[in-house]
Amino acid sequence: MNAFIDVSGVFLETPRLFLRPFKKEDLQDFHAYAKVPDVGEWAGWKHHESIAESEKILSLFISEKKTLALVNRKNGHVIGSIGIELYHCALPKEYDFLLGRELGYVLAKDEWGKGLMSEAVSRVISYCFNDLDLDFLTCSHFARNVRSRRVIEKNGFRYAGDDDYMTQMGNHEMDRYYVLDNPRCRK
């Protein structure tokens, strides 16, 4: 079952990142990475075509209180996001009465390949399991998205199944989903 999430007052740190709720002042940084072709498309959404589009989505991030900005500690710029989303994948019956969420993430294209998302996901897993006491997390990637698969596997998720996913652009993608159990909660 999906747990309630509110990241309003959350501030997390990693060696190279700060993770915190988005603010209206993040608009320029957010638009800078969200407008780049291929960034959103790997996550199922079309890259942003205008600052107004980015502003609308940023407002959703702020109001929904489930998405954290990834801030580069060196320069203070927002370079990505990680959402603690509602999960929708089909899990075994044993999960019906356990609390969980799904992690979804995106990173600026010029930051790919540096291990930053693995670092961020690891920290958010720790927050979800130790602070929120969630029982499990899910995460998924398009079958062709090798980079995202590496992040998921590096963080210990185990493969749970495939599903057909309809992107916001109307394309069908084979979606691979994974689950990670909280070691403290597992039978």
Image (cartoon, rainbow, N blue to C red):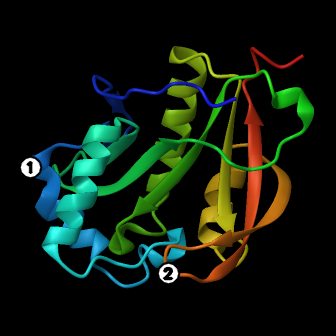
**Image location (x, y in percent) of residue 136:** 71, 30
Using the rendered view, name the quadrant where residue 172 is placed: bottom right
Amino acid type indicated by mark 1: Glu
Most extreme residue toward the front is 170
Other residues around mark 1 within 10 Å, as few (<14) / some (14–19) / many (≥20): few
Quadrant where the image shows the C terminus: top right
Q: Which residue sits at x=15%, y=52%?
A: 26
Residue at mark 1: 25
**Image location (x, y in percent) of residue 8:** 29, 27
**Image location (x, y in percent) of residue 124:** 50, 35
Q: Earlier in the sequence, mark 2 or mark 1?
A: 1
Q: Which residue sits at x=12%, y=47%?
A: 24
**Image location (x, y in percent) of residue 50:** 18, 78
Q: Can residue 16 be seen in this snapshot?
A: no
Q: Is residue 47 left or right of residue 141?
A: left
Quadrant where the image shows the N terminus: top right
Q: Is residue 58 left or right of residue 152?
A: left
Q: Can residue 38 be seen in this snapshot?
A: yes
Residue closest to the eye, 58 or 111? 58
Alpha carbon separation for disc pair 2 and 1: 28 Å
Residue at mark 2: 169
Residue closest to the eye, 55 or 152? 55
Say if 95 sits above or below 70 in the image: above
Other residues around mark 2 within 10 Å, as few (<14) / some (14–19) / many (≥20): few
Q: Is residue 147 left or right of residue 22?
A: right
Q: Which residue sits at x=52%, y=72%?
A: 44
Give the numbered dot on residue 128: none
Q: Nearer the viewer, mark 2 or mark 1?
A: 2
Amino acid type indicated by mark 2: Met
Under circle 2, the secondary element is loop
